[in-house]
Image (spheres, helix red, strand yellow):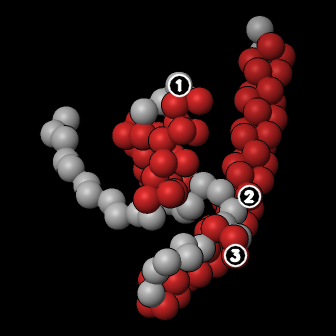
Amino acid sequence: MEKATMDIEMNEDLKENFDAVCKDLGLDPQTAINIFAKKMVNEQAVPFEITEKDYPIDEDEERKARCKKIAKGALIGAGIGLACSGIVRLIVRFAKKEVRKEEKKLLFWK
């Protein structure tokens, strides 16, 4: 698979703290960001709750507004994800019951 490069701007203190946490976890920052990206794509939402304290402090108002919009979408996405997982569990349970019914029919006709 072809690799792409992405430049990310962030507060210097945040970067230093991020690097330290990654090191403590045995990860390099690139791997941590790739894990985050993969999880976000798989879930089609931000894979964690974003709170007011998570908003960037040193960014302009437009970027803050976008962050808040993303955070609201993440909460909605998480709710949809929970609802969908419940539906999937019901479908699987129903399918298992149907398989058992078919197995009983086969045993009856032997």
Q: Which residue is mark 1?
A: 26
Q: For the residue labelled by badge 1, is the local secondary structure a helix, a strand or a loop? A: loop
Up-down relation of residue 6 to residue 23 (above or below): below
Q: Nearer the viewer, residue 74 or 88?
A: 74
- Image coordinates for residue 62, horizontal then vertical, percent: 44, 90
Distance from the alpha carbon under mark 1 to that under mark 3: 28 Å
| Residue extending furthest toward the bottom | 61
Q: Which residue is mark 2?
A: 82
Q: Which residue is mark 3?
A: 52
Sort mark 1 into few (<14), some (14-19) or many (20+) by Cα contacts within 10 Å.
few
Kind of residue at badge 1? Gly
- The quarter of the displayed image where residue 97 is located: top right
Q: Is residue 90 visible?
A: yes
Q: Nearer the viewer, residue 72 or 5?
A: 5
Distance from the alpha carbon under mark 3 to that under mark 2: 23 Å
Q: Nearer the viewer, residue 90 or 77?
A: 77
Asked if the residue at tag 3 contacts the one at tag 1, i.e. Cβ–Cβ closer than 8 Å, the answer is no
Mark 3 vs mark 2, foreground winner is 3
Q: Does label 3 or label 2 sit earlier along the sequence?
A: 3
Kind of residue at badge 3? Glu
Q: For the residue labelled by badge 2, is the local secondary structure a helix, a strand or a loop? A: helix
| Residue extending furthest toward the left | 2
- The quarter of the displayed image where residue 38 is located: top left
Residue under the point 73% across and 29% down: 99
Mark 2 vs mark 1, foreground winner is 1
Q: Is residue 105 left or right of residue 44?
A: right
Q: Does label 1 or label 3 sit earlier along the sequence?
A: 1
